Image: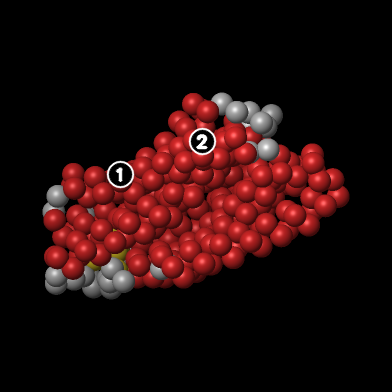
Amino acid sequence: MYNDISFALFLTFLAGLSTVLGGAFVFLFKQINARFLSFGLGFSAGVMIYLALFELLEEANNELQLSLGHEAHWQTTGFFVLGLAIAGAIDLITFHQAKICENLNLSISSQKKNSRNCLIYKSNSKQGLLRTGLFVAFAIALHNFPEGMITFTAANVNYVFGLSVALAVAVHNIPEGLCVSLPIFYATKDKMKSLFYTLLAGLSEPVGALVVYFFFSKYLDSVVLGRMLAAVAGIMVYISIDELLPTARRFARWHVSLFGLVSGIAVIASSLYLLNQ
């Protein structure tokens, strides 16, 4: 285990701050390009799926083999399925993020006076917008908390692995930040307020890392770490297939998100190859 606590916390903090970067996009454009959002969500799904299936599961199996030998394969598979189940349970309890974004009444404008493929927010109630935005911020904060635990744990395995996981988390936090800032900004017309709530949602990631460090670090032997990584792989696959890709396809034609998916796989595979050289 690499076990550089300061580096792991730093990576988790940066991954969380990428949520703010996504929130800032709303101030750069009067209209949000739907194709860009669809591509970005597909890209995030590609990064997360590749990491889960080709990095996390392999690392989990290697950690478990140190103590369990041939039984490691079944434990890896079992905790991967457990991760899928945990993500499904969280999905039912906290509501699907894609459904939350859909409830914001985002729609694609086809009017000539607006640019094609631009996302327009339509609502008559500013107070309703604000309540919705705050609820989205709360839901994404809950979603980001275990991601902080993921990034911190991965960075404690080795710095290359930690960098790759932090990249995956940071990339898919960007469109999440947009989902937080968009309704709050339209409701209040206050850029700083929308950024503030986006920051709060992003800071739940380093909080998750601190929870691991102060309460679970003493118990992170090879067996616990391997099981955790396998479960995390299941969570990442569930989020990608059930959340990111369906949401991406709602914002543009299917091939836009597919191109993003393939691009995400290509970028993360290439970056992992270069980092391991």
Spot the residue most to the right: 70
Residue with the mark numbered 1: 199
Q: Secondary structure at mark 1?
A: helix
**Whether residue 156 can be seen here:** yes
Residue type, label 1: Leu
Left or right relative to 233: residue 96: left
Callout 2: SS: helix
Q: Is residue 28 visible?
A: no
Q: Is residue 168 above or below residue 136?
A: above
Q: Amino acid at mark 2?
A: Tyr
Name which residue lies at 66% across and 58% down: 80
Q: How many marks?
A: 2
The residue tagged 2 is: 213
Q: Position of residue 111 (x, y in %)?
A: 23, 73
State the residue at coordinates (66%, 44%): 224
Q: Residue at x 66, y 31 (%)?
A: 1
Q: Is residue 35 left or right of residue 110?
A: right
Residue at horizontal 50 percent and vertical 58 percent from the top: 42
